[in-house]
Amino acid sequence: MKKVGIIMGSDSDLPIVTKATDTLKALEIPFEVHVYSAHRTPVEARDFAVNARKNGFGAIIAAAGMAAHLAGAIAANTTLPVIGIPCKSSNLDGIDALLSTVQMPTGIPVATVAINGGANAALLCAQILAVEDKELAAKLDAKRASDAAKVLEKDKAISASF
């Protein structure tokens, strides 16, 4: 199975990235986590992206706040799918990061999840990898069914209280 690369612009993004790693662990998807900044370590970020396919990655998650150029910088250097997680900061509640992540020029796509959407970024990577992996697709189907059952149990409990 291909790995997922997770890059965060700062270690302050770790609580959001942990939601992604927990999801990938639950689905038994291998991953690596690195801290590379689009601005402070551009050479290392570029090298990771350029070599990602050769190094066994099938998708990349890039988490960053504020200017949030990391996902775009990674996407500019690979044709692997890149999923951006805009991270909430003390300025503008993450709207700045969201806008930076989604406003990519034609030819350099970045899929973007919700602000602080680590779990959804991991699930999107899983769905991408599951296109060619029936076992992983079955795990995703089972997770969806389990999530639906949990909601229906909550519905039953709430309905019974009225």
Image (spheres, rainbow, N blue to C red):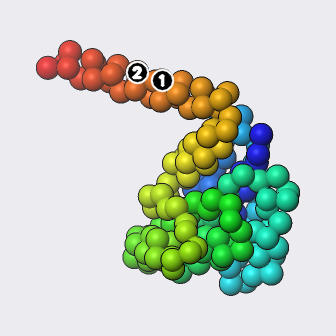
- Which mark, residue 23? none
**Nearest to the observer: residue 83 or residue 85:** 83
In the picture, which quadrant includes the N terminus? top right
Estimate the x, y position of residue 59 in percent, counting from the top left: 68, 54
In the displayed structure, 135 sits above or below 60; it is above
Residue drawn at x 27%, y 23% as measured from the top left:
155
In the displayed structure, 50 sits above or below 149; it is below
Picture quarter containing residue 12? bottom right
Q: Are marks 1 and 2 in contact (CB under 8 Å)?
A: yes
- Which mark, residue 146? 1
In the displayed structure, 15 sits above or below 38; it is above
| Disc 2 target residue | 149
- For this view, does 128 lie left or right of residue 88? right
Label 2 secondary element: helix
Name the amino acid, label 2: Ala
Picture quarter containing residue 133? top right
